[in-house]
Image (cartoon, rainbow, N blue to C red):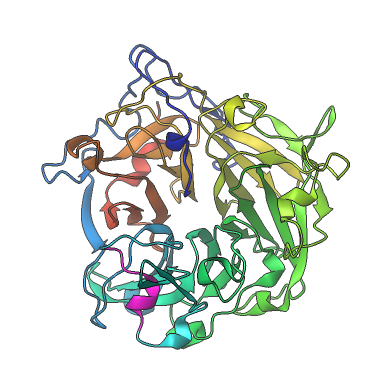
Amino acid sequence: MTLTRRNLLGRSAVGAGLAATGNLAALIAGTSASASAFATGNGSPTAGAYGELITDPAGLLDLPPGFSYTVVSRVGETMPNGKRLPGRFDGTGTFSGPDKSIFMVRNHEQGATATAIGAPTQDAVTDPAFIYDAGTRVVNGATLYAANGGTSTVVLDKHGRKTDEYVSLAGTFNNCAGGVTPWNTWLTCEETEVKVGANGALKDHGFVFEVDPFDPQNNRNPFPLAGLGRFAHEAAVIDPRTGEVYLTEDASNPHGLLYKCVPNNPNPGYGNLRAGGSLFALQARDGNGPVAGLSVYRVGGTVLQGGWVAVNDPLAAVTSTRKQFRHAANPSAPVATRSRKLEGAWFGNGKAYIVCSYASPSDGSGGRHDGQVWALDPQAGTLTLEVYFPYAGPAGGGAEDSVPDQPDNITVSPYGGLILAEDSEGGQNILAVAPDGSTSLLARNRRDIVTPASEDISEFVGVVFSPDAKTLFFSTQEPGITYAVTGPFARVNRAK
């Protein structure tokens, strides 16, 4: 998530048509794929399932009729321990607590630097036992931390009122996405390959950590889950049937891979992943043999066969995990299937849903698109292209762009279909993909439109439903604001 295409490419949807095609029939039995509900004349979406978004008079979040929001958290606010809440919110999980309360664990994607208002996680804890890497460096006479990321935990009562908020993991690096476990903990992922000694780091980074949302004492003395590999982690999801963990990698030169860890201890429970496991990389196949990259596929419903090849050095002691497979500098290595911007992942309906945010020949991809969602079916051994966003055009791209592109975080909707969070160079939207494959806007970041272009207004992140499915939570990363949205979510299933 740190590097987005806004840094690399420009594009404009003005005058360009957009169609997202998909085949989400597996989510709701008996449904079939159809074209997306988007106009092709001016690049603007039709009302779709939820209706036209209503301009928010507060200038924060536009929502459809019948929906409303509350603000859960803001970066820099004072927490009960008297410390400031760190910034750069990202991947988020929710968990059911006593008396219908909600426990939420939220990532902070901070690396070697942190914004002035977004305090490093190490400044936001009172007990150093919650800090993984306390390394520092001196820059222009100032002492700075080597690792500023981590997680915060928020507790809401049954009325949605915040009763507690604290940093539950500190001293990690670029905590990006992650995933919930079947035993109700949060896996938080470091999107980095920083090693000990870099910028004052005392430890290697690029790991997954397990965070207990209910008992803070379990988060003391953070323990990297080495069996899940050391690489630029994005998201992690678990197949509850087998305990196998699927992990995405957001990287370039060469592009990242999709991994699977077969744990040594498959029994569900807190801490079981500390026993390690065997790491594999996806080697998908089509009728022509092993697939080198996913970007070339454009037809919703395309099915690839899944296979796995062992990662010989999961801790990347000598060579990055993705570089251990065939690429320009290592042409004789085994083929593993790559994609630019492998981002969010979520497990639901027996499948792992995987997002590829975008691809272009200019970044070394074999094809070009503005987003793909793949469904990995572990039991069938297949990988299916569920949602496809065609490339919308080459130049420009303004803050008022309402044509969806570059999906990032994802969750499976309890009402059928998917919810996607954009990380776009234009307007930032929350997207609802219905079971028939059609796509509608569910929310728009109004600050994109009312804020001067000189101010950094970045992506939506951490999209996730509450355990009772009544509330959808998500955040903006810059500035950090976490929202709770309620409304008629089931409307997405109405006939088009």
Horizontal side of 311 relative to 294 (left or right) equals right
Q: Position of residue 280 (x, y in %)?
A: 77, 56
Horizontal side of 252 relative to 476 (left or right) equals right
**Residue at point 75% right, 57% down?**
319
Along the line of sight, the residue nearer the viewer: 471 or 491: 471
In the picture as drawn, the residue positioned furthest to the front comes out as 140
Quarter occupied by residue 207: bottom right
Against 470, residue 10 (above or below) is: above
Along the line of sight, the residue nearer the viewer: 160 or 146: 146
**Residue at point 40% right, 61% down?**
113
Q: How many marks?
A: 0
Quarter occupied by residue 286: top right
Give the magenta range.
117-125
Against 258, residue 444 (above or below) is: above
**Residue at point 57% right, 31% down?**
359
Q: Position of residue 21 (x, y in %)?
A: 53, 26
Q: Position of residue 432 (x, y in %)?
A: 41, 39
- Residue 182 in view (yes/no): no
Q: Position of residue 408 (x, y in %)?
A: 48, 44
In the picture as drawn, the residue positioned furthest to the right comes out as 332
- Residue 394 in view (yes/no): yes
Quarter occupied by residue 451: top left
Horizontal side of 259 relative to 359 (left or right) equals right
Q: Is residue 245 magenta?
A: no
Q: Indicate the quadrant containing the C terminus: top left, top right, bottom left or bottom right.
A: top left
In the picture as drawn, the residue positioned furthest to the left comes out as 57
